[in-house]
Amino acid sequence: MRLVLLLGAALLAAPALAQVVTPSDPADYPDQPGRDEAVMFCGSCHSFKIVASQGMTRAQWDESLKWMVTRHNMPELEGEELDTILTYLERSFPPKPAGTRPGWTNPFAPSR
Amino acid sequence: MHTRIEADPARGHVQAEQPAGTPAQGRRNLLRGSALAALGAALAMTAAGRGAPPVALAQGKGPQMLDYPGKHKGLAVLGDRPLVAETPEHLLDDDTTPLDKFFIRNNGQLPEQEGNPDSWKITIEGEVNQKLEITLGELKQRFQAQTHRMVMECGGNGRAFYAPTARGNQWTNGGVGCAEWTGVKLSDVLRAAGLKDSAKFTGSWGTDPHLSGDPEKRAISRGNPLAKSMDEHSMVVWGMNGQPLPHIHGGPARLIIPGWPGSLSTKWLSTVLVRSTPHDGSGMGGTSYRIPVTPIVPGSTNDGKSFVDMEAMPIRSIVTAPANGTRLAAGTRTIALRGAAWGGQAPVARIEVSPNAGQTWQTVTTTPPRNPFDWTRWTHSLALPSDGYFEIWARATDRHGVAQPLVATNWNPQGYGANPINRIAVLVG
């Protein structure tokens, strides 16, 4: 499967200078189809934490992936692999409603 | 009744609970949680210990806190690869931001540490009469040193206030610090290489490896018009708050391009390229560090071709004491507020606070900045009419009459320029 090859390439490119950090763990993120693929693919270059902190539409996630391809030489995803990862991102991290976005929230708000 | 608020509730207690480990331990155990609860406990303890009424912070699910050698454990981790951490507003309560509280922003990996800082090499090339290769030691000998206290701020500071969410690290107001930078004027170094008439722009590179480890890629490279590089406050620095520039902040040597997006202040500076055309390094063009001229619909897609490079940072103010979420004793009717304001576009002219969501505003007392690009510290004694829940707003206005907006405006896909009024909530009783 091409995705596995891409992951392998990304891991092989892992640097000698790599800092010792806790790798992104799929179990930390919403349990939806495509979770392992998304966390491993995105997490091979950067922490998945930044992914999970966003909330975007499918079109915006697609645009973000394209941006990483042109800007950071991310291996381009196509077909079923692209669909798997986009679907996971879209379902798990959709646009956040007001009050749940990052930014300022009332620290005294009653918990629901 | 006047309630005294601890300037830095987290100091001491949290550090005592979690002593700094060895560098190896620090790396292995980068992240810790539950810091907000610890903060609340610490605040209550310190206040009680000084005979002041008990205060506490609201409890809640907090961000992951940083555990990194030499850094304050109250910094909030936005990303661990690359390492990015912001300074909560209440930890920006010092007039000069201490090294341990200074925010961290990386685009790539950390380069290896230089054993002998004075042998660090910097190259000036491009549209110059003679390519200049100089060590940091030679730089210190050859040019006149200067020290200025200046704000360093991430271009994306405030991004978290955009709706809908903009792409990137979700900074609140904590991608900022104000330190005393010691170094030489960048203009002196560029002139030493001899600027050609064709010299119009600069671009720069550091030695930080790309996040992927690919040696063919650069982590980031940014640039600006030559005029900004020739500003007497644009510097090559090796000192921060009187100490050698820490590795995590770009030591042994970095650029400081004050008042503009922090990414221009290249860390681990190795090369400045003088150019006849705008710089085209990674980190330039598209939607990166660029903002719309013609405002776009929030949430829409855009390739950024019609955007312009973000230059001077917008005006911003913050309340640094009390901390957001502070609970005060019943009967408290006066709060001692402290804060800071700054902006790259024009000097701060006025700072106001409101206890009632902007219905009425009160002007605060300011301490003049030491030099251009320093921040303005302010204090204010705010009267409250009753017990209860209050949101305290702060806004700054610059000398051109431009004030902070109530909400983040001019939305763009990567979220640059969000500077809405700052707010904290306190609960009396």
Image (cartoon, grey):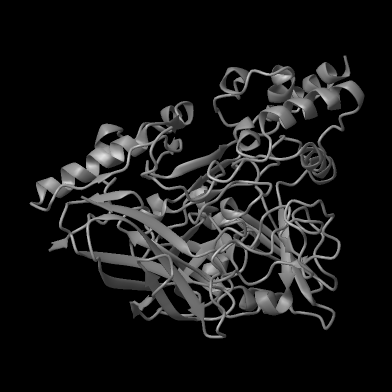
Residue B386 versus residue A90: which sits nearer the camera? B386
Q: Whole-percent x and y of residue B75? A: 42, 45
Q: Residue furthest left?
A: B51
- For image coordinates 54% across by 71% down, the residue present is B404
Q: Is residue B86 left or right of residue B382?
A: right
Q: In the image shown, does A54 or B284 lie closer to the viewer?
A: A54
Question: Horizontal and vertical percent for residue B128?
Answer: 79, 74
Residue at 69% x, 20% y is A35
Relative to residue B238, is residue B327 drawn left or right? left
Side (left or right) of A8 relative to B315: right
| B322 is higher (above) or lower (below) than B226 | above
Q: How many marks?
A: 0
For the question of whether residue A44 can be seen, the reply is no
A13 relative to B104, above or below: above
Q: Is residue A16 above or below residue A36?
A: below
Q: Residue B30: x and y, percent?
A: 46, 32
Q: Nearer the viewer, residue B293 or B382?
A: B382
- Quarter of image, res B22: top left
- Outermost residue to the top: A1
Which of the 4 quarters of the picture holds residue B315?
A: bottom right
Q: Residue furthest right?
A: A79
Front one among A15 and B428? B428
Can residue B2 be seen here? The reply is: yes
Quadrant containing the N terminus of chain B is bottom left
Residue B79 on image: x %, y %: 57, 39
